[in-house]
Image (cartoon, grey):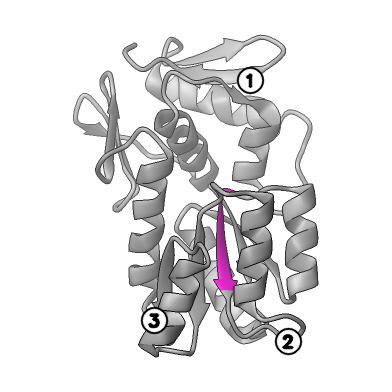
């Protein structure tokens, strides 16, 4: 899951990027409205975390611009303003959710999981496909109730595939969900992660769609 964080408070942004990275998300950060709109036009994220108090253009105006470009892209507003009228203005402008600063990272993660459930096939924090279960709250993956040891990238890749069970995930989309803008990606990195997952899950769980990407069947 790729997140675009639009926040001009750099210490806060740095902490959020680290926390989200540790929680299995790919988070790219920009500090201005101009940079945010450019990023949206060039590399669409899965979710936007948008600060209202940006230095160049206010966040509500940015939100309206986002909605003109993309009516379906989930946007969670982050703001120091906690007045009811500010919340109403944000939600009426197309925000999916609203978090007033200061907030706990655990609350943000819960809001993100709720958005993910709306985007994907999962209805709870636990996604089960065949004998494989993945819990997005605890990051625990098990096969026939036996807990597996997965690297962070392996977990992120498996989560993306299982959330979209039955749908092909193209290579470029998977890479965007695994790596942030600044990370160097080896040409065979995705194949290596798939290979490691197959050794742990069995060769039949993740299927290769040649020339396109990978998929997990809804009922393997």
Q: Nearer the viewer, residue 105 or 114?
A: 114
Percent position of residue 148, x then y:
33, 35
Percent position of residue 189, x then y:
69, 33
Residue 213 found in image quarter:
top right
Percent position of residue 174, x then y:
61, 34
Distance CA(mark 3)–CA(mark 1): 38 Å
Distance CA(mark 2)–CA(mark 3): 21 Å
Q: On screen, 5 above or below 127?
A: below
> Which numbered mark, 2 or 3, is in the foreground of this view?
2
Question: Which one is earlier in the sequence, the residue at label 3 or at label 1?
Answer: 3
Q: Which mark is residue 103?
A: 3
The residue located at (36%, 53%) in the rendering is 113
Q: Nearer the viewer, residue 166 or 96?
A: 96
The answer to whether one can see residue 161 in this image is: yes
Q: Can residue 48 be found in the magenta stretch?
A: yes
Q: Which mark is residue 213?
A: 1
The residue located at (61%, 11%) in the rendering is 209
The residue located at (65%, 59%) in the rendering is 66
Residue 97 found in image quarter:
bottom left
> Which numbered mark, 3 or 1, is in the foreground of this view?
3
Residue wearing tag 2: 55
Assess disc 1: are there few (<14), some (14-19) or many (≥20) residues with their C-alpha within 10 Å of its C-alpha: some
Q: Secondary structure at mark 1?
A: strand
The answer to whether one can see residue 181 in this image is: no
Q: Secondary structure at mark 3?
A: loop
Q: Can residue 66 be found in the magenta stretch?
A: no
Along the horizontal axis of the image, is 97 left or right of 28?
Answer: left
Percent position of residue 98, x then y:
42, 72
Q: Nearer the viewer, residue 33 or 202?
A: 33
The part of the chain drawn in magenta is 46-50
Q: Secondary structure at mark 2?
A: loop
SS majority, magenta = strand
């Amino acid at each position: 899951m790729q997140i675009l964080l639009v926040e001009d408070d750099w210490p806060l942004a740095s902490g959020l990027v680290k926390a989200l990275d540790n929680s299995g998300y790919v988070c790219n950060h920009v500090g201005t409205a101009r940079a945010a709109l450019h990023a949206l036009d060039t590399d669409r994220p899965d979710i936007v975390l948008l600060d209202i108090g940006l230095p160049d253009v206010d966040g509500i105006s940015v939100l309206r611009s986002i909605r003109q470009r993309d009516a379906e892209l989930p946007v969670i507003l982050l703001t120091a303003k906690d007045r009811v009228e500010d919340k109403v203005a944000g939600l009426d402008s197309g925000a999916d959710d609203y978090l007033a600063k200061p907030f706990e990272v655990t609350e943000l993660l819960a809001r993100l999981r709720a958005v993910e459930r709306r985007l994907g096939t999962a209805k709870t924090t636990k996604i089960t496909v065949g004998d494989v279960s993945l819990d997005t709250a605890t990051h625990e993956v098990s096969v026939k109730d036996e807990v597996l040891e997965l690297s962070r990238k392996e977990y992120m890749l498996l989560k993306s595939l299982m959330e979209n069970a039955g749908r092909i995930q193209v290579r470029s989309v998977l890479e965007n969900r695994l790596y942030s803008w600044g990370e160097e990606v080896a040409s065979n990195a995705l194949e290596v992660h798939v290979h490691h997952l197959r050794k742990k899950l069995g060769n039949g769980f993740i299927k290769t769609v040649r020339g396109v990407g990978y998929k997990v069947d809804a009922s393997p």
